[in-house]
Image: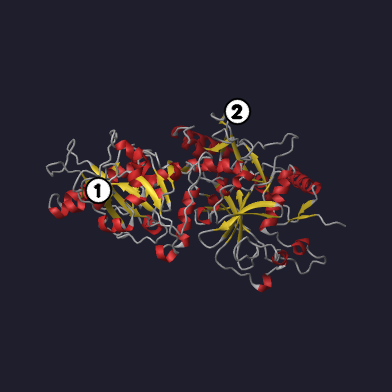
């Protein structure tokens, strides 16, 4: 998009309005238009108005002082807009329009119709110096509130060099009352859902504000202030600047200014860089540089490093949502596409995923839903944890450690045809994902340590078991348990795969030390402590080096892969890390009982005892594990091999496998 200088200075918004212009922000006579809602999105608080002709108007702090000019009747009136609006060059629908005079004032506005949910086809190639192949493949248009939020982050200089950028001022977002069909707006429901999920994971929203709900059937119009000046492309056409200078200025803005400040624009081009022109029509220079303003933010993105630090705040938010996951108050203001349901007396938040799958998130807190979308964990680098089953450890973009396991429901267990007695495993069959969650929660509520179930995911693509290996019993039992959808389906389908998502247990229950008042929850990793600046880089490397050296003495170092395997514990102040005499920082490691036995941390008697005690604990609650083995029990230890004990002196253990646990049959 290129801009030309306005014919007058009427469009400039004074930084400090004079007495005559303060009437533009006066609400006198407009009180009936202002709602009581307190909206906030991506760090920006909005004043919400219901204009006389319908729709919704969200005003930023920049827009409130000139709100009378921004009322749609003063610029969006169709006949007025047709005669006074000028479409600006570019692929998007962007217009310059001067408002009707209000109290003798008229503002030059840039009116931009948001392309949220539309497919991106940027006029560039993967060979462009400003965009990577990964960025090109995942490009999407910012939503209106997301675009304003990122722009304000850029203006404030929240990351990196903290450079001050000159940009257009985001004034308002207008949502006309008309309801449109998807095809009329060119939107894809899947693409739009992704933008909604971005809204849902907004880390700046607190309980004091209402979330803004995006509606796929409504148009979103962003209103910006006009920036006076000329784009580099126009200056090139005029011969004012050479191609070499234009390219140099574009590259400087991108590589020397934006990237170090934590941002990039996927379609960076000379037309987006506006140089100032003085009254004599010459380009302004300051300290031998050209001051410039940036325009067009629909493909504005954080850099990977900036996004990583943004993810840290998501991680803290995640744990607060987990802590509150069974609080019924979280059912308020739930997005329309999500539903609260109960299966086997366990509450879930149910909803579709962008890839056509279905997701059940444990608890009543809809704010957790987006943390478990399959694109967060299924397509990430992963570590396989079992040689027998599909069990993986993955770290999501929000820095959440998850274990996900493909359910064996519907698979007929193997049996030895020469056995005289029927196999209990074959008689019982593999538990469904919903049974696994019920059993884990039942054990935990009765004092038996078990890993935390987080969610159940059903794939979107079809997958059918071969008939000779098919066990239909669980599907038949769940036949009348339906999804809460317009076209209900059975919660168990033998045409799809299921995954159960679990919290990653690494030696300490992560919820024991957590409370909302604390930034942390009783434990952290070396990497996380480094990110949170509890350690510096030298200390982090020293802890890693010394821990591996301690493990090597017991020949355990090869079992562990990265810094996230080693947990550090906090002192009671929740601000400093625990240390041990002669060993430096207190470190906890985790492994299963079978690994511990193979590496001589457990002797024969201890190994048998831990299995017998675990079987007795289950039996006391009326349960039995049909395939109880050491790799189904997780234990924790120090790097020297000292095992963690519970208050009664037994070796602490946590059950991590639930697909063959059953109620003990009555005789």
Q: Residue furthest bottom?
A: 467
Badge 1 marks a residue whose secondary structure is strand
Q: Residues within 10 Å of mark 1 (few under 14, many from 20)?
A: many
Badge 2 marks a residue whose secondary structure is loop
- Horizontal arrangement in the rendering, residue 107 relative to residue 39 (left or right): left
User: CA–CA distance between discs 2 and 1?
Assistant: 52 Å
| Quarter of the image that includes the C terminus | bottom right
In the picture of the structure, the residue carrying the numbered disc 1 is: 273
Looking at the image, which is closer to me, 441 or 182? 182
Instruction: From the image, state whether disc 2 or disc 1 is nearer to you.
Output: 1
Can residue 286 be seen from the camera position used here?
yes
Mark 2 vs 1, N-terminal side: 1
Identify the residue at horizontal 31%, vertical 60% (top origin): 125
Looking at the image, which is closer to me, 15 or 78? 78
In the picture of the structure, the residue carrying the numbered disc 2 is: 572
Image spot of residue 541 (x, y percent): 47, 36
């Amino acid at each position: 998009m290129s801009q030309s200088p306005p014919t007058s200075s009427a469009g400039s918004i004074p930084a400090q309005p004079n007495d005559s212009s303060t009437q533009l922000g006066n609400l006198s006579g407009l009180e009936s238009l202002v709602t009581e809602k307190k909206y906030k999105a991506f760090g920006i608080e909005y004043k919400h108005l219901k204009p006389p002709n319908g729709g919704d108007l969200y005003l930023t702090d920049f827009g409130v002082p000139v709100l009378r000019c921004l009322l749609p009747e003063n610029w969006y009136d169709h006949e007025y807009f047709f005669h006074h609006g000028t479409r600006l060059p570019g692929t998007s629908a962007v217009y310059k329009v001067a408002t009707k005079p209000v109290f003798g004032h008229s503002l030059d506005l840039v009116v931009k119709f948001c392309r949220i949910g539309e497919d991106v086809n940027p006029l560039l190639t993967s060979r462009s110096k400003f965009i990577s192949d990964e960025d090109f493949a995942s490009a999407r248009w910012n939503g209106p509130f997301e675009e304003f939020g990122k722009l304000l982050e850029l203006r404030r200089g929240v990351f990196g060099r903290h450079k001050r950028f000159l940009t257009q001022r985001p004034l308002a977002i207008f949502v006309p009352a008309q309801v449109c069909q998807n095809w009329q707006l060119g939107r894809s429901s899947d693409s739009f859902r992704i933008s909604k999920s971005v809204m849902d994971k907004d880390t700046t929203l607190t309980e004091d504000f209402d979330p803004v709900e995006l509606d796929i059937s409504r148009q979103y119009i962003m209103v910006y202030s006009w920036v006076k000046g000329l784009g580099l492309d126009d200056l090139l056409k005029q011969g004012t600047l050479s191609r070499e200078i234009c390219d140099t200025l574009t590259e400087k803005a991108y590589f020397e200014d934006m990237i170090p400040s934590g941002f990039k624009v996927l379609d960076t081009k000379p037309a987006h860089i506006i140089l100032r022109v003085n009254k004599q029509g010459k380009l302004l220079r300051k300290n031998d540089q050209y001051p410039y303003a940036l325009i067009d933010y629909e493909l504005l993105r954080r850099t990977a490093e900036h996004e990583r630090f943004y993810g840290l705040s998501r991680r803290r938010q995640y744990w607060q949502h987990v802590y509150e996951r069974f609080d019924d108050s979280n059912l308020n203001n739930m997005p329309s596409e999500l539903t609260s349901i109960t299966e086997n007396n366990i509450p879930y938040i149910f909803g579709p995923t962008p890839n056509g799958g279905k997701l059940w998130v444990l608890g009543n807190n809809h704010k957790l839903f987006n943390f478990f979308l399959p694109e967060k964990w299924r397509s990430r680098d992963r570590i396989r944890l079992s040689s027998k089953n599909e069990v993986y450890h993955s770290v999501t973009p929000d820095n959440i450690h998850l274990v996900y396991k493909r359910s064996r429901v519907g698979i007929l267990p193997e049996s030895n045809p020469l056995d005289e007695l029927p196999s209990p495993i074959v008689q019982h069959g593999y538990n469904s994902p919903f049974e696994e969650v019920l059993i884990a929660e039942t054990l935990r509520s009765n004092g038996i340590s078990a890993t935390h179930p987080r969610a159940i995911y059903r794939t979107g693509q079809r997958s059918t078991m071969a008939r000779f290996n098919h066990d239909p019993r669980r599907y038949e039992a769940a036949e009348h348990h339906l999804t809460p959808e317009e076209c209900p389906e059975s919660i168990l389908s033998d045409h799809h795969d299921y995954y159960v998502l679990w919290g990653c247990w690494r030696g300490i229950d992560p919820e024991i030390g957590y409370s909302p008042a604390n930034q942390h929850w009783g434990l952290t990793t070396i990497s996380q402590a480094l990110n949170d600046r509890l350690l510096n880089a030298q200390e982090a490397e020293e802890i890693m080096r010394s821990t591996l050296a301690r493990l090597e003495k017991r020949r355990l170092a090869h079992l562990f892969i990265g810094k996230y395997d080693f947990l550090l514990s906090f002192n009671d102040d929740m601000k400093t890390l625990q240390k041990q005499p002669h060993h430096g920082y207190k470190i906890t490691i985790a492994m299963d009982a079978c690994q511990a036995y193979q590496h001589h941390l457990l002797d024969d008697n201890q190994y048998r005892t831990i299995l017998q005690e675990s079987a007795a604990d289950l039996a006391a609650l009326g349960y039995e594990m049909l395939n109880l083995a050491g790799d189904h029990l997780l234990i924790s230890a120090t790097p020297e091999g000292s095992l963690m004990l519970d208050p009664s002196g037994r070796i602490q253990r946590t059950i991590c496998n639930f697909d063959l646990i059953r109620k003990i049959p009555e005789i």
